[in-house]
Image (tube, rainbow, N blue to C red):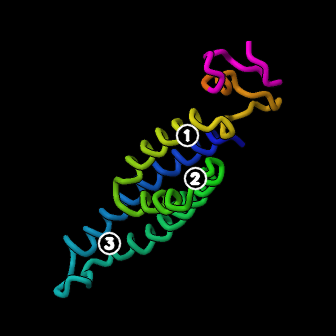
Amino acid sequence: MTARASFARFRWAAIAEGIALLILVAIMVMRYGVYGGDPWWESTSDLWSTISSRWSPIHGVIYMIYVVLGFDLWIKMRWKLPRMVLIMFFGVVPVLSFFGERYLHSSMERDLRRRPTLQDADASGAESSTTRGPDTGTGAAGRADGTVD
């Protein structure tokens, strides 16, 4: 599987995680803020307690999928450990997963241009047409056997 395919899966997970986290925050606001009991941590509304108890595990599974797909992308891109910590952090702060996905996309594209060993290969094992262009200094497309046109 290629790095771009891993990123495509991660992108969908980041969007799903961002939406799921926003829904969870809205539920928590309704449960503790709007319908909160006398002590701020007690809820007087059983409806929001029920919704919260049902949505929280769903969000947990979505976050675990997000982390696994982030790990897959991290391995494919051969990034350092702080990048993986950053990926996990993007899924914890509401709305940050949307911005984090854009940041990781630009970072991935920059790394794929800068480090040719990360370039995607097609199913036949041949390199893509843009793999060797920037490295040769001529801008010419390279072939799978390493020669330049």
Q: Judge by depth and name the residue closer to the eye, 41 or 142.
A: 142
User: Is 78 on the left-hand or right-hand side of 38?
Assistant: right
Instruction: Give x and y (percent) for residue 6.
Output: 62, 45
Q: Residue 79 got which mark? A: 2
Label 1 environment density (alpha carbons within 10 Å; few <14, some 14–19, many ≥20): some
At x 55%, y 40%, the residue is 111
User: Can you give x and y, in whole percent of width and height, for residue 137 in the image?
Assistant: 61, 20
- Residue 83 magenta: no
* Residue 115 higher or lower than 144, as above or below: below
Determine the secondary structure under disc 1.
helix
Give the SS element for disc 3: helix
Whether residue 85 is situated above or below residue 14 in the rendered picture: below
State the residue in front, 146 or 95.
146
- Kind of element beneath mark 2: loop
Q: Magenta segment: does it hold 148? A: yes
Identify the residue at image location x=26%, y=85%. 42
In the image, which disc is placed on residue 48? Answer: 3
Q: Which residues are magenta?
A: 135-149
Kindly check if marks 1 and 2 are in contact, taking CB atoms under 8 A apart as contact. Answer: yes
Task: Please state which amino acid type lies under the numbered disc 2.
Answer: Trp
Task: Name the residue rendered at 64%, 54% in the picture.
Answer: 75
Q: Residues within 10 Å of mark 2 (few under 14, many from 20)?
A: few
Rounded to the nearest angstrom, the CA distance separating label 2 from label 3 is: 41 Å
Three-letter amino acid code of the residue under disc 3? Trp
Residue 65 position within the rendered picture, expressed as x and y whole percent measured from the top left: 57, 59
- Residue located beneath label 1 in the image: 111
Q: What quarter of the picture does the C terminus occupy?
A: top right
